[in-house]
Image (cartoon, rainbow, N blue to C red):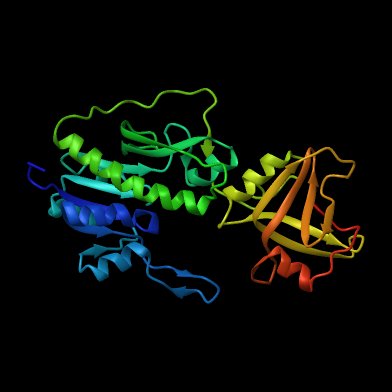
Amino acid sequence: MNFKKPNIIFMGTAGFGIPTLDLINKNYNLKAIITNHDKPSGRGLKIKNSPVKDYAIKNNISFYQPKNLKNLDFIEVIKDLNPDFIIVVAFRMIPESIWKIPKFGTINLHASLLPNYRGSAPINWVLINNENQTGITSFFIDKNIDTGDILFQQKIKIDERINAGDLHDKLQYLAAEVTEKTIDGILKNELKPVKQVTISDLKTAYKFDKKNIQIDWDNDALSIYNKIRGLDPFPGARTTLYLNLEKEERKLLIYKSDYIVKKHNNKTGNVIVSDGVLKISCNNGYVIIKELKVEGKKKMKTRDLLNGFRISDNSYVK
């Protein structure tokens, strides 16, 4: 670079932001890291550092964990750091009193091709909806969620067999590339912000709840397969297994599957076990279950489940 290294503040918490944070630390003047305050998590409700906080400690970088981003003392801290940019990856809503401070603006990196898939789970929903491409968008933050003027987009093709975890890992490195191109493009006056277009059938990356992670076995095989891979490894696709004419039931999370398109006379949701293979009928074929978790047990391969778990001929899921 033939220009002065800009002062940058990084805001983020999740591991997705680490490649971008590392790029900023190695190539620019990283003034500070802002990350979420520590919260109890897991079964034991233990306090655990976020990946971003761990990075800050390991690399001896100043960091702040404000509970309230509108706190006047915190706002003064940001002003005193005199940032040229604030770069945001997987953080929370940022008030205007903060995002207006940097000389060149506050830029968010979002894991979709905006304006589609605004929201908290874009990586999952592009797979659930069987998209064939996705990417990273850099844009100026404004008052709403993921609606600011677009600076740069980079696309990648989606492999039809990739799951959400692997796509997450690909996109986190692409986000770092897009960050560098965005910062350098602004400094060289080569990027012009573009307003997001209005789309009538806009697709949204909804937050997950118990209802929208539930498998509908009346759907076609490909749709169910895409839902499962889109929710792997987290939160998992949910269904309930009914055994012995509904005398027993087990909550299941399904993580890995395959599918067959084939005509049949079975009711949707019928569970069929044959030669160590567990398949479930849907409206145009079967979904083959390869990895799952029974409530109260660890995640396991289907063959391990079948070794210690008897599934009768009249079992079904819904």
- Quadrant where the N terminus lies? top left
List x then y, in percent, for residue 222. Answer: 68, 40
Image-based side of 275 in relation to 15, left or right: right
Q: Residue 169, how many percent across, how many down?
A: 43, 53
Residue 223 visible to an observer of this rendering: yes
Position of 313 compared to 208: left or right?
right
Residue 305 locus on image (x, y percent): 74, 68
Q: How far across and down, in percent of the image, does residue 97 sit?
A: 25, 45
Vertical relation: 123 (above or below) 256: above
In this orientation, which residue lies closer to the viewer: 235 or 44? 235
Q: Quadrant of residue 138?
A: top left
**Count of numbered badges drawn on the protein:** 0
Query: Residue at point 71% right, 55% down?
Result: 289
Query: Considering depth in this image, is 266 or 318 the residue closer to the camera?
Result: 266
Name which residue lies at 73% across and 62% down. Answer: 251
Name of the residue lying farthest toward the front: 275
Q: Is residue 69 above or below residue 48?
A: above
Q: Is residue 207 left or right of residue 66?
A: right
**In this rendering, would 143 be left or right of 160?**
left
Residue 76 visible in image? no
- Residue at image position (90%, 41%) is 265
Residue at 36% in and 58% down? 13
Asked whether 62 or 215 is in front, the reply is: 215
